[in-house]
Image (cartoon, helix red, strand yellow):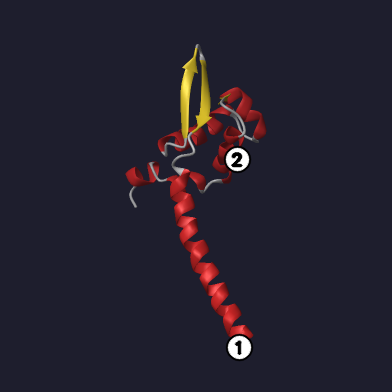
Amino acid sequence: MNNIDQKHDVFVAIADPTRRKLIHLLASTEELPLHELTPYFQMGRSAVSKHLSILKEADLVTNRKIGRETRYRLNAAPLQEVKDWLSFYEKFWNEKALLLKNILEE
């Protein structure tokens, strides 16, 4: 996968624990500015801003300017791709568990 594909890949975006925490924080509110997100992390505003940029490139975050302030909001729609991927493996493992159960009951 090249760098261009990775910029828009939701799996790459959610691979980092900081970005997963940002998603969680934004999911629990309508929108937040950077200065309200930063205290949740042991890093500066510019580092948090870079993580938000990666989430934005994957279309997981949108932003809007209000005066000099930028407010960030979660766009959860791309997470459907993750859900679909996980659903396949959930079905796979459920079938394997059922097969094992049937074998053990014989």
Label 1: few (<14), some (14–19) or many (≥20) C-alpha neighbours in 10 Å: few
Q: Nearer the viewer, residue 41 or 76?
A: 76
Q: Nearer the viewer, residue 55 or 46?
A: 55
What residue is shown with label 1?
Answer: 106
Q: Amino acid at mark 2?
A: Lys
Q: Position of residue 26 (x, y in %)?
A: 57, 33
- Taking the image as shown, residue 91 lies to the left or right of residue 4, namely right
- Residue under circle 2? 21
Q: Is residue 15 above or below residue 40?
A: below
Nearest to viewer (mark 2 / mark 1): 1
Q: Are marks 2 and 1 in contact (CB under 8 Å)?
A: no
Which element type, helix, strand or loop, lies under badge 1?
loop
Residue 100 visible in this rendered orientation of the protein: yes
Quadrant housing residue 78: top left
Furthest residue in direction bottom, as rendered: 106
Residue 12 makes an appearance in the image: no
Residue drawn at x 38%, y 46% as measured from the top left: 6
Q: Is residue 63 above or below residue 86?
A: above
Mark 2 residue element: helix
Residue appearing at x 48%, y 34% in the figure: 75
Quarter of the rendering containing residue 47: top right
Q: Position of residue 41 (x, y in %)?
A: 64, 35
Callout 1, which amino acid?
Glu
